[in-house]
Image (tube, grey):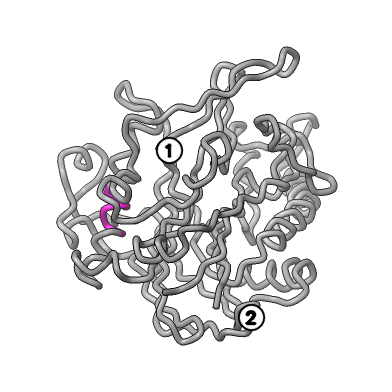
Amino acid sequence: MSFRLATFNVENLLTRFDFTGFRNQLRQDRVIKLFQVSSEGVYQQLEQARVIAATDDTRQMSALAIADADADILCLQEIDNMAALQAFEYGYLFRMVGNGYRQKFLVEGNDSRGIDVAVLMREETRDGQKIELKDIRSHAMTTYRDLDLFNEELALTNRIDDKIFKRDCLELDLLIGGRPFSLYVVHFKSMGNPRDGLDGRQSTMPIRRAEARAVRRIIEDRFGAEQAGTKSFAICGDMNDYQERVDVIGRRGTGYRFEHQNETESALDVFSSDGFAENVVRRREPLDRWTLYHARGPQEQWLCQLDYLWLSPALAAHNSGRLPEIIRSGQPYRTIFPPGQEVERYPRTGWDRPKASDHCPVVMTLDLP
């Protein structure tokens, strides 16, 4: 008995328009800047037309990436609300995949933009094993005080009664073919702007580290610290941090070379330092673990993993001979691939848009002990 588990940040699956660009040039789309717009009403009409036209291509590619992942259980990030999820699943996924995801779960979280984590599940695995939800819990309201996680680092930007998860940690108890499986879906704090001499990653790392500690505490409080490793659980999502990266050195006209390097610290060390969970993507070759391309000019470009399937020790050991897959056909043409990793992009893919997402789906076939 096996099932396929995947995670994917589809990026801004929204049901609303953002018209703030009329007054704030920094939020105005580049194509609108090419035209003289005489009034806010005209701006709103143009912005609606632009978003609707671009969204159809984007969501076709998102659906193609999900279809290629072919997961039985799909963890998603950046979903506006259940209405957006239902419209996307019926209008795009159902047509692409051939059969839909009947089970849909989303709880409104804490993100100021209203983007949430969600889970789509089939009713059965591909070999006919029933997938059942036994319980679902949101941890969006959990505070630093609740889990005694507040410290001096966090005090620089947070208060003790602030919520730990900047989106949520959505916990699902499942039975797959009658066997228990616990799933934790997260989307950790994004890397912000530089502050107090620290870059955006370093300045926000204390918040992500607290989120990781909170996930671990939730699991250990439930199963017991000594017994957690023997249970079947997975922590999935966009964690906005990495323990290694591949520097991309060079320019388009002269070619590139790729250098792998480990980071000295990461918020995700909370999971890996003592073997609490395994990042199964690290079973792939070092240059082939990335799920996102980052670039700010030719002097700052790298490939890194932001999207994770962390498995409990028992579940990882039971699937020791298996590798996760990374679906990269939805990447825009601006993404630079190491030699031998090139893929055929989806039709109508652009230089930086349209695209399935800047993130790649990560999927793995698993057996439960």
Q: Look at 19% across and 64% down and name the residue there.
A: 225
Kindly indicate the quadrant of the structure image that contains residue 338.
Answer: top right
Q: Which residue is mark 1?
A: 191
Q: Which residue is mark 2?
A: 127
The image shows a total of numbered marks equal to 2
Q: Secondary structure at mark 2?
A: loop
The amino acid type of the residue labelled 1 equals: Met
Nearer to me, 243 or 354:
243
Give the image location of residue 174, x and y in percent.
Answer: 44, 79
Which quadrant does the C terminus fall into?
bottom left
Q: Look at 69% across and 42% down and name the residue there.
A: 331
Q: Look at 45% across and 44% down and name the residue there.
A: 240
Nearer to me, 161 or 357:
357
The amino acid type of the residue labelled 2 equals: Asp
Q: Earlier in the sequence, mark 1 or mark 2?
A: 2
- Dot 1 alpha-carbon crowd within 10 angstroms: few under 14, some 14 to 19, many 20 or more: some
Q: For the stretch drawn in magenta, what is the main secondary structure? A: helix
Q: Is residue 4 left or right of residue 157?
A: right
Q: Look at 43% across and 48% down and name the residue there.
A: 239
Whole-angstrom CA distance, mark 1 to mark 2, is 40 Å
Q: Secondary structure at mark 1?
A: loop
Nearer to me, 244 or 119:
244
- Dot 2 alpha-carbon crowd within 10 angstroms: few under 14, some 14 to 19, many 20 or more: few
Magenta extent: 210-215
